[in-house]
Image (cartoon, helix red, strand yellow):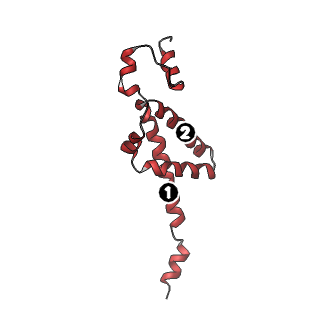
Amino acid sequence: MDECKPLVRGLFVPHTRTGNPLVDSVAEHQATKGDVYWKYFHFTVFTAPAGMIMCLTRRTDARIFVAAYFLVAGYFSAKMVRLVLLLGPAGGLLRTSTQTTQTTIHRPTESALLYEHSP
């Protein structure tokens, strides 16, 4: 258990190194650069924050969980490139909620469709 303490501490304190030069030199353990998010998530970079706002405006337990998961995964993915994988499911859920909300807002009602086609 003592071997894990420097690794976990390195996630929260930016200047802390593990003390092991082999681990410190591995590229996967470095902080994430901004272009990585665009490279892996592309359009989700724009739609996921909008989905988080939508989840927080229409609160249910499930939506609050997804928003909290997105925030926590975003924090840890910024600390280490390897942890960007944690952000994928949360970003996908939030992007889907954005698209679902947009289609339900812009979908015409049945009465409007019937009114247009009536003689």
Residue 49: x percent and y percent?
52, 48
Q: Nearer the viewer, residue 70 or 25?
A: 25
Where residue 7 sits in the image (x, y, percent)?
47, 19
Single out the residue that lies furthest toward the top: 2
Whole-percent x, y for residue 20 in the image: 41, 13
Relative to 30, is 55 above or below? below
Tag of residue 100: 1
Q: Is residue 2 above or below residue 38?
A: above
Q: Is residue 95 above or below residue 113?
A: above
Report the label total.
2
**Circle 2: residue type:** Leu
- How packed mark 1 is, by other alpha carbons closer than 10 Å (few <14, some 14-19, many 20 or more), is few
Residues at marks 1 and 2 touching, judged by CB atoms closer than 8 Å: no
Q: Position of residue 70 (x, y in %)?
A: 52, 40
Name the side, left or right, on which 1 lies relative to 60. Answer: left
Q: Residue at x 61, y 48 (%)?
A: 56
Q: Is residue 22 left or right of residue 9?
A: left
Question: The residue tagged with tag 2: helix, strand or loop?
Answer: helix
User: Which numbered dot is residue 5?
Assistant: none
What residue sits 37% from the left and 27% below the top? 28
Side (left or right) of 76 relative to 61: left
Quadrant of residue 67 within the rendered picture = top right
**Badge 1 element:** helix
Residue 17 vs 56, above or below: the answer is above
Mark 1–mark 2 Cα distance, whole angstroms, equals: 21 Å
Which mark is first along the chain, 2 or 1?
2
Q: Which residue is mark 2?
A: 71
